[in-house]
Image: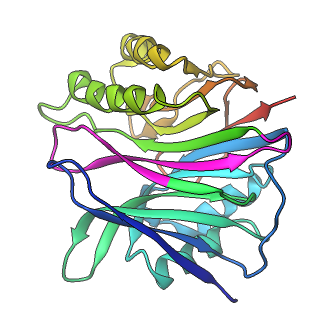
Amino acid sequence: MATLEATLGVMGMKSFFVILIFKLILITASISEANLPLQFTVGSYNLYGLRNENDLKKDLNSLSNVQIWAFQEVEGNFSEKTEQKLKNILPSGEWYIFSQKVNLLDQKKGVWEGQVIASRFPILSVEVIPLNHSGQKKRVALVANFKTENGENFFFANTDHEVQIFSIDFNDRKKQLLSLVEYFNKTESMGVIAGDFNTTGGDEEISNTEEIMDQAQLKRATSSGQNTCTFEKMFIKNELDHFFSRGVDFSARHRFDGRKGSDHYPIYMDINLL
């Protein structure tokens, strides 16, 4: 398998944030010039640290219709080994991978936790957006920019927000939401934000999240089914994962009920730019 790796830049962040190096990796050597089509499917899946590769592969193969993925909680060294793991779990064919290591989990072993955008379509440019946070873990959103068939700009973002532990609650996650609003209010592009928003406060927090995201004209896709939870572990059930879109027609958010590889359910929705 031939690969192409391009270091795209080193970004200077605010004082609360560590300087990050981000890379764009092409899993196969051939590079298509095709732009983003006017109808496609996007998905989001918290990979639970890539602990269950075989089951994740089954999940993603069952969702081979998804053409752009946002992955959270990706653990690895973010080099060849992580690339190989992603190749193993993704359906066969060409994928463009934008990966970012964010938090160092094991310094001795060089294990990081990060996020990934995987796309069937060429990525025009990428950016890592630092999100304000309260906890020890840094928080970012990855943004991949595309050009559509009709020449318009389209963004796809992957975000992962703070977990409800001890003193961390919605007031802390609100900082990440406001960081997103600030960034996306600076662009008029249409697009989708996907990810693990960790809305553990239930309907009230989801409503508050919608209100804040509306400040950047970003609308949440509601669930297509009666069972809205996207996280299930033992007796805990929550709706944590969401899509927010701007300037596009989108279907209801769907959940893949047959998931086996994570404590989250993968979600997906169809996008129509016609």
- Name the residue nearer the viewer: 90 or 192: 192
- Residue at image point 71% right, 23% down: 252
Describe residue 49's horizontal placement relative to residue 71 as left or right.
left
- Residue at image point 49% right, 64% down: 99
Q: Is residue 215 above or below residue 167?
A: above
- Name the residue nearer the viewer: 171 or 232: 171
The x and y percentages for residue 172 are: 22, 28
- Name the residue nearer the viewer: 206 or 191: 191
The x and y percentages for residue 259 are: 61, 49
- Name the residue nearer the viewer: 112 or 180: 180
- Residue at image point 19% right, 77% down: 107
Describe residue 80's horizontal placement relative to residue 130 as left or right.
right
Q: Is the C terminus in the top left, top right, bottom left or bottom right quadrant?
A: top right
Q: Residue 42 occupies which quadrant of the picture?
A: top right
Q: Is residue 236 visible?
A: no
Q: Which residues are magenta?
A: 127-151
Q: Residue 267 occupies which quadrant of the picture?
A: top right
Q: Is residue 107 visible?
A: yes
The x and y percentages for residue 270 are: 77, 34
